[in-house]
Image (cartoon, rainbow, N blue to C red):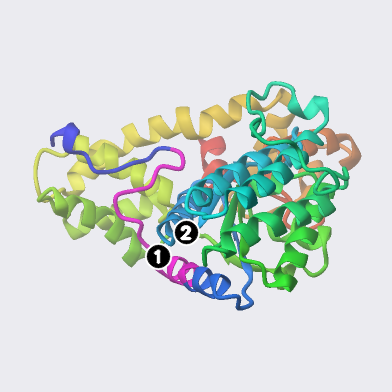
Amino acid sequence: MDPIRNPYAPGAGQRPPELAGRDRELEQFEITLERVAAGRPERSMVLSGLRGVGKTVLLNALRSQAVKRAWGTGKIEARPDRSIRVPVAQAVHAAVREVAHRHRDPDRVDQVAGVLKAYALRTTLADRKGLGWVPPLDVPATKGRADSGDLELDLLELFTDVASLAGDLGVGIAVFVDEMQDIEAGELAALCGACHEISQQGAPLVVVGAGLPHLPVALAASRSYSERLFRFVSVDRLPREMADRAWRVPASDEGVDFEQEALDELYRLTDGYPYFVQAYGKVVWDAAVGSPIGLDDVAEAAPLAEAELAIGFFGARYERATPAERDYMTAMADLGAEGDGPVATAEVARHLERKPQSLSPARDGLIKKGLVYSGERGSVAFTVPHFGRFLRAR
């Protein structure tokens, strides 16, 4: 096959040519945008799932919907070692710029820009280090608004003012947060508190988050009402019909089809995980000699796809771990020989013939690096599908 015409896109966060299996989420967000803009109560959305299931792709698709509705939008990617104050300021600044040029009152726009500047300037020197972004310089910082230093209060005042500016135009503001589980617990509570007040006001602003499977637990721990504040969506692997659609539709646009046996084998190899669907689709396309793509083409391409995943998808993550952390993950893989589901931390300790307390640094390091997560007390699981299989094959 011509590699230039290869339609599959296994890049990180890169939208595939056919966004299969996410119609329900897209339709629900359309309703959310319409209701919020009309002043009707509606919950924000939180996406959670393993690595490689397409959370970032879906988050970007939701943002595109908001842009088409002429909303102001901004996006941040949370990091465990950095406060969200500056990233939120950057995202809100981008959102304000998208609506400000349509506003008929420049003084009102400058007033909101002044509040944004006041909010951003409350950032500590440590949190500004290494960032090239500076708040708008052509307006003075407002005094006494979003500048208290209390993150929850400042977020509330900032969100209130920018939402009001967008509301003048009959639209809203949407802030998208990727890797939401990496927000420090106190700041996550502040964000939830501000969103709670905003929703009670009926202000046209939504926060849409995406993160690992334990994100709903982290939100519930930060504020007890988070389960009523957000609409939680579990982003999982694609069912067979949707996986077939993800392979077939892009290929048909290029005049190519698949034999049923080839699709059967592809689904067995990928389990329907969207990243694997794209990765195998790309390699199989390059290996195939013509249409329809058959079982022999898949058999020839599968080792190549596995080798690429072993280096780029699995290997890169494995190399980030310390020797002690690798031992911990290997024990998890051994104990989960029937799959990659959660394993008890006590079982890991017994397997390694160690005391549980002595393994806490390794477990905590893996959680901070996003390699494992703890969905419930006393258990851990891999954040990456098929990671146990990869470790057992080493």
Residue 16 belongs to magenta span:
yes
Image spot of residue 345 (x, y percent) = 79, 48
Quadrant for the N terminus in the image: top left
Within 10 Å of the Cα at label 2, are there few (<14), some (14-19), or many (20+) other Cα atoms?
Answer: many
Within 10 Å of the Cα at label 1, are there few (<14), some (14-19), or many (20+) other Cα atoms?
Answer: some
**Which labelled disc corresponds to residue 239?**
1
Task: Label 1, secondary structure: give it.
Answer: loop
Among all residues in the image, which is located at the extreme top? 130
Q: Is residue 231 left or right of residue 264?
A: right
- The one nearer the camera, 244 or 294, is 244
Image spot of residue 386 (x, y percent) = 51, 45
Stretch of the chain drawn in magenta = 12-30
- Could you tell which of marks 2 and 1 lies nearer the N-terminus? 2
- Residue 132, compared with residue 286, is above or below; it is above
Q: Is residue 257 left or right of residue 191?
A: left
Residue position for label 2:
66
